[in-house]
Image: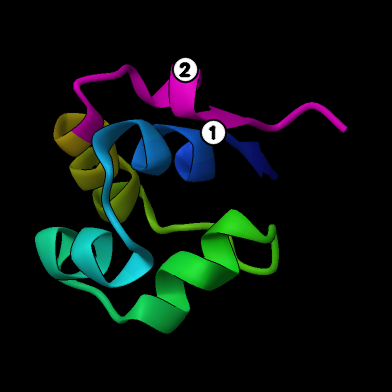
Amino acid sequence: MKNRITALRAEHGWTQADLAQRAGVSRQTINAIETGKFDPSLPLAFRLSRLFNQKIEDLFDDEP
């Protein structure tokens, strides 16, 4: 699944570790999401959308 997490994280000046701490997950989880190796659970997707003040559909794109 494509996502805008890397770009939004950079806009906020956060490292993967910063975002992971704020979202309550590991840095490896953030890395896996950003590289498309892992699709987040719905609760995690909602947490990320709240952290970035974005709609989930603006963060993630399930189109190939």
Residue at far right of view: 64
Q: Residues within 10 Å of mark 1 (few under 14, many from 20)?
A: few
Q: Depth check: 17 or 56 in front?
A: 17
Report the residue marked by disc 2: 58
Residue numbers of the magenta segment: 52-64
Q: Residue at x 48, y 20 (%)?
A: 57
Q: Is 60 drawn above or below residue 47 in the view shown?
A: above
The quarter holding residue 12 reads: top left
Say which residue label 1 marks.
Answer: 4
Residue 35: percent from left, percent from top: 67, 61
Element assignment for label 1? loop
| Left or right of 41 on screen, residue 51 | left
x, y (%) of residue 44? 28, 54
Contact flag, marks 1 and 2 (Cβ < 8 Å): yes
Judge by depth and name the residue closer to the eye, 44 or 34: 34
Is 60 one of the magenta-colored residues?
yes
Q: Is residue 56 magenta?
A: yes
Q: Which of 42 and 14 is in front in this view?
A: 14
Residue 49, horizontal then vertical, whole percent = 27, 32
The image quadrant of residue 55 is: top left
Instruction: Reply above or below: 10 against 59.
Output: below
